[in-house]
Image (cartoon, rainbow, N blue to C red):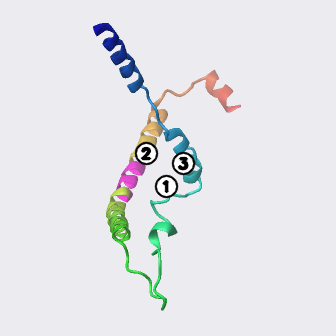
Amino acid sequence: MAAPLKTLRSTGERHSSRCFTTTCGAQAGIEWTTENGLARSGTEYGPLTDIPDWFFADGRSAPPLKGQLRRKQERETLARHVVNLSPEVDKGMEVWREKREEAKRIEERNKSILLKPKGNLLLKKNK
C-alpha cells in the first residue's frame, strides 16, 4: 500500500511543477507601444490616468484622486531630480570632451615623434 501512495505523490509533484504562464500573450504589443512612444500599459500616463473621470454639471472638474495626486508628485520629484543632475551631466560631458581632445593631441604628438623617411623613400613619397 505504501508503493501506490508514493506513486500518487510523485505524479502529483510532477504535475505541480509544470510551468504555466500567460506573459507571452500579455507582452505581445509592448514592443509596438514603446516604439510608438506610448505607455507600456494603460495605467502609466496619458489621458485615461491624468484627466478626471467626471465633471460637475456646471463644468468644474472633479477633485483629483489619490492616484492622480501620487503620480503628479512622482513626476514633479523626477523633474526636480533631472534638473538637479543636469549640470552634473554637462560637466561630465565637458570632462569627456577634454579627455578626448587630450588623447588626440597625444596621438598627434606621438605620430610627429616617429621616425621620418629619408633618402630615396622621401623622394618616392613626395612624387
Q: Which residue is mark 3?
A: 30
Magenta residue span:
90-98
Looking at the image, which residue sits at the far bottom? 58
- Residue 27 visible, this orientation: no
- Residue placed at 66% from the left, 29% from the top? 125
Task: Single out the mark in the foreground, 1 or 2.
Answer: 1
- Residue placed at 45% from the left, 86% from the top? 56
- Please, what is the three-letter code of the amino acid marked with disc 3? Ile
User: In the picture, residue 25 is in which quadrant?
Assistant: top right
Mark 1: few/some/many CA within 10 Å (<14, 14-19, 20+): few
For the residues marked 3 and 2, what is the alpha-carbon distance in whole angstroms?
Answer: 38 Å
- Residue placed at 57% from the left, 48% from the top? 29
Question: Magenta segment, principal secondary structure?
Answer: helix
Q: Which mark is residue 41?
A: 1
| 105 relative to 87 in the view: left or right | right
Mark 2: few/some/many CA within 10 Å (<14, 14-19, 20+): few
For the residues marked 1 and 3, what is the alpha-carbon distance in whole angstroms?
Answer: 8 Å
Relative image position of residue 94 (x, y in whole percent): 39, 55
Looking at the image, which residue sits at the far front? 1
Of residues 115 and 73, the one drawn nearer to the viewer in this rendering: 73
**Earlier sequence position, callout 1 versus callout 2:** 1
Helix, strand or loop at label 3? It is helix
Relative image position of residue 35 (x, y in whole percent): 58, 51
For the residues marked 1 and 2, what is the alpha-carbon distance in whole angstroms?
Answer: 41 Å
Q: Which residue is mark 2?
A: 100
Helix, strand or loop at label 2? It is helix
- Residue 8 visible, this orientation: yes
Mark 3: few/some/many CA within 10 Å (<14, 14-19, 20+): some
Relative image position of residue 52 (x, y in whole percent): 45, 75
